[in-house]
Image: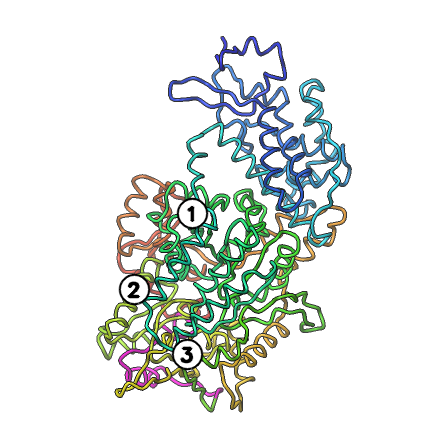
């Protein structure tokens, strides 16, 4: 029996071992098998990986990693497996399943034999190109640790390969002459970048063979210079139709400054613009012109919360069409096409809109799926929107990786916010130094003057910042206004205040927002709020702080429960945003921002700490509450007195043994979680179309399109709360998707409040 492959039979090929070695096989619609020769695959991956690494001058390293990554496929065991008499296994190249052959360890062993300690660099890449970057030490990951896999008892995985099987021009390579980027402290990032080049090259070369149509779908994006033309035309039309208001005159000048400063050299920048100053579009103007001027590859717009990412992506998509790719958990699959789904795998698109979680966790990741896109961050412009929301407990590793990316990988960062965090170097609590961002340049000529020009609100602080009020009196105050927004720091506070408000107006004019509502529900409520404000209808909104970070609403009056000064400033950004507030005689007025002391303190942790700093800074203070000088003091207090700016010791895990190339990649990936998923359980709720989607799940089982849609109907619940809901029978595990829990019946989810939580639950679980 033999297989026909391009006219050469397997029987004939057995006489020539070099052309007989296979990397992959596939079967076409007619049933004919096609072969991907191993030598061709290795050279193809090597070339692609080298091309990807050009922008950080590591072609030699990437080329060798590509040539050696599949040396284990030259073994008789792998070749017998892929050429079984029962037919080819098209998935034989994937490790991990029972019966599959380990083909990644052999190349790692060969690398260490060839280059000793330097060979460990290749060993990480090659050993991990399917399973992910391993730890060096075995304490956390046992036998999967690289030191174990390179042990002498594993040598047989390379020694079993016939000396004649591997072409010498692949096997014998000279040690690279270029040095790793970033020194010992930056070795982990450089390794991840090389790993990204290898993994993406391997995926794409395999994809070219297995599914050429998918490869074609990745093409067709426009270049940034063409998108800049579209953007400038959009802004010209927008300017021509804009009202001649003071705010719009100031916005035009902010845009001008961003365009002019774009020609400055790549590096670290801050864009300090008060909320309502047109920061999003002006920041994109800088990014686009800077990218074209300095031949950057793409723009990556990073946003803290999924609750606002769709709003921003929608703005950009209106300008740039399908050249914008969103990558986040709550993406509505109706907005995706085949090409955008592929682009989220490796970010090979001109404009990416993503989240802090996706961006920064990927830079400390170990999994192939997370690391694959990293080389496409190189030589890009990264805009960090609402940069003040970077979490203090991870601030040191975040600052370290940003400095590395700016210094060695051609990345320009723009820290865009109304309240710039104090990220320069300083001595933290206990004298430990913080290695900060010390070369940041401000884009605006005079941010202080800009704040005075765009001052559209008056902030009122209570004389007594220590004595709490009560919700009844606050509700009474809110009823004085036709349109008012009240922001609190706890979900249970939002629910209680909403209850008091709706008891008086029967729920006609009061709306509620919190993360106990699914994404689809929140989007609908935000759209309703905007429509009511535009129509000058009565609307009173009770919200947690999720509304503060960039949600584009404009209230005449905003109440804010005592919080950090950064939160107070963000709340003020939802007030008189357009500067159009007038009295009955047409005179311009300032919006009102009223800070109050809530009945219960902010939850334990960073929110309570921030509120305490505000109390200390505002006690007896007579100046401008929203001044940049006071904001700087706030962040200095917040960071200097933080218990740790590297809570999990990420820096030490990555650098303490880096000179010996002994790095704990997998342990770091587990510890670097901006959101601690382990403390929460996701449930799928029966809101709107969620009912029909859940029925489909139980009939069809999970598939990509359906699960993407269901993400819009998910809510994250604290584990303790979830345990009670499960005991009560309010949720049950899906029969078709083990580990995923769905709402039972119709009583758990309320059309106004979202998931209904029993009042006996500990309130500190109910934040945001």
Q: Is residue 475 in view from this perspective?
A: yes
Residue of label 1: 739
Q: CA distance from mark 1 to mark 2?
A: 33 Å
Of the numbered discs 3 and 2, the one sitting upstream in the chain is 2
Residue 698 lies, in percent from the top left, at 31, 43
Q: CA distance from mark 3 to mark 2?
A: 22 Å
Q: Is residue 544 left or right of residue 148?
A: left
Residue 596: quadrant of the picture: bottom left
Choose between 236 and 360: the one closer to the eye: 236
Neighbours of disc 3 within 10 Å: few (<14), some (14-19), many (20+): many
Neighbours of disc 1 within 10 Å: few (<14), some (14-19), many (20+): few
Q: Is residue 487 magenta?
A: yes
Number of disc labels: 3
Nearest to the eye among marks 3 and 1: give it: 3
SS for callout 3: strand
- Residue appearing at x 32%, y 85% in the figure: 477
Neighbours of disc 2 within 10 Å: few (<14), some (14-19), many (20+): few
Instruction: State which quarter of the image contains the C terminus.
Output: bottom left
Of the numbered discs 1 and 2, the one sitting upstream in the chain is 2
Residue of label 3: 560
Q: CA distance from mark 3 to mark 1?
A: 38 Å
Residue 520 lies, in percent from the top left, at 32, 57
Residue of label 2: 527
Q: Residue furthest right?
A: 116
Of the numbered discs 3 and 1, the one sitting upstream in the chain is 3
Q: Which residues are magenta?
A: 465-494
């Amino acid at each position: 029996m033999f297989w026909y492959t391009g006219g050469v039979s397997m029987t004939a090929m057995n006489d020539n071992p070099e052309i007989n070695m296979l990397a992959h096989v596939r079967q076409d619609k007619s049933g004919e098998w096609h072969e991907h020769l191993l030598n061709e695959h290795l050279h193809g991956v090597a070339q692609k990986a080298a091309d990807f690494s050009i922008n950080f001058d590591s072609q030699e390293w990437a080329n060798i990693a590509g040539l050696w990554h599949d040396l284990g496929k030259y073994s008789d065991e792998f070749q017998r497996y892929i050429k079984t008499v029962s037919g080819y296994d098209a998935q034989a190249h994937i490790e991990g399943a029972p019966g599959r052959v380990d083909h990644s360890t052999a190349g790692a062993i060969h690398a260490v034999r060839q280059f000793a300690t330097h060979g460990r660099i290749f060993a990480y890449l090659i050993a991990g190109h399917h399973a992910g970057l391993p730890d060096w030490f075995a304490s956390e990951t046992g036998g999967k640790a690289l030191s174990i896999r390179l042990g002498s008892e594993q040598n047989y995985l390379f020694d079993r390969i016939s000396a004649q099987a591997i072409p010498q021009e692949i096997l014998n390579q000279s040690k690279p002459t270029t040095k790793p980027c970033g020194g010992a402290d930056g070795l982990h990032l450089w390794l991840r970048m090389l790993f990204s080049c290898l993994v993406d090259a391997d995926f794409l070369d395999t994809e070219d063979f297995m599914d050429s149509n998918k490869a074609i779908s990745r093409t067709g994006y426009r270049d940034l210079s063409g998108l800049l033309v579209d953007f400038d035309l959009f802004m010209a039309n927008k300017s021509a139709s804009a009202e001649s208001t003071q705010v719009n005159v100031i916005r035009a000048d902010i845009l001008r400054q961003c365009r002019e400063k774009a020609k400055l050299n790549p590096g670290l920048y801050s864009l300090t613009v008060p909320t309502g100053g047109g920061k999003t579009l002006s920041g994109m103007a800088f990014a686009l012109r800077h990218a074209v001027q300095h031949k950057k590859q793409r723009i990556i717009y990073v946003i803290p919360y999924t609750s606002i990412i769709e709003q921003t992506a929608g703005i950009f998509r209106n300008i740039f069409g399908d050249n914008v790719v969103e990558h986040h958990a709550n993406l509505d699959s109706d907005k995706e096409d085949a090409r955008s789904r592929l682009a989220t795998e490796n970010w090979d698109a001109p404009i990416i809109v993503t989240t802090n979680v996706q961006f920064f966790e990927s830079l400390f990741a170990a999994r192939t799926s997370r690391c694959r896109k990293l080389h496409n961050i190189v030589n890009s412009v990264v805009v960090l929107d609402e940069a003040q929301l970077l979490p203090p407990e991870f601030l040191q590793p975040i600052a370290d990786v940003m400095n590395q990316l700016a210094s060695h990988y051609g990345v320009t960062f723009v820290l865009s916010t109304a309240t710039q965090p104090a990220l320069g170097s300083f001595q933290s609590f206990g004298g430990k130094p913080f290695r900060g961002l010390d070369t940041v340049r401000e884009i605006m000529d005079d941010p202080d003057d800009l704040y005075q020009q765009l001052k559209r609100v008056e902030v009122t602080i209570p004389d007594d910042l220590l004595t709490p009020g009560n919700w009844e009196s606050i509700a009474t105050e809110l009823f004085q206004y036709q349109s008012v927004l009240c922001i609190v720091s706890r979900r249970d506070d939002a629910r209680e205040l909403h209850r008091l408000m709706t008891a008086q107006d029967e729920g006609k004019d009061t709306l509620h927002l919190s993360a106990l509502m699914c994404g689809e529900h929140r989007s609908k409520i935000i759209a309703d709020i905007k429509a009511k404000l535009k129509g000058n209808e009565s609307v009173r909104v009770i919200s947690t702080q999720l509304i503060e970070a960039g949600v584009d609403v404009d209230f005449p009056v905003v109440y804010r429960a005592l919080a950090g000064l950064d939160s107070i400033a963000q709340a003020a950004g939802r007030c008189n945003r357009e500067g159009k507030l007038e009295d009955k005689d047409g005179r311009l007025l300032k919006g009102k921002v009223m800070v109050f002391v809530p009945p219960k303190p902010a939850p334990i942790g960073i929110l309570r700490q921030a509120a305490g700093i505000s109390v200390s800074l505002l006690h007896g203070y007579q100046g401008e509450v929203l001044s940049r000088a006071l904001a700087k003091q706030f962040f200095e207090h917040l960071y200097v007195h933080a218990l740790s700016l590297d809570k999990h010791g990420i820096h030490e895990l990555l650098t303490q043994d880096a000179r010996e190339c002994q790095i704990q990649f997998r342990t770091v990936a587990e510890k670097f979680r901006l959101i601690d998923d382990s403390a929460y359980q996701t449930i799928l709720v029966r809101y709107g179309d969620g009912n029909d989607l859940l029925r489909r799940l139980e009939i069809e089982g999970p598939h990509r399109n359906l699960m993407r849609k269901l993400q819009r109907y998910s809510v994250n619940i604290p584990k303790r709360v979830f345990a009670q809901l499960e005991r009560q029978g309010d949720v049950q595990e899906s029969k078709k998707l083990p580990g995923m829990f769905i709402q039972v019946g119709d009583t758990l989810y309320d059309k106004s409040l979202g998931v209904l939580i029993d009042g006996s639950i500990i309130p500190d679980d109910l934040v945001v």
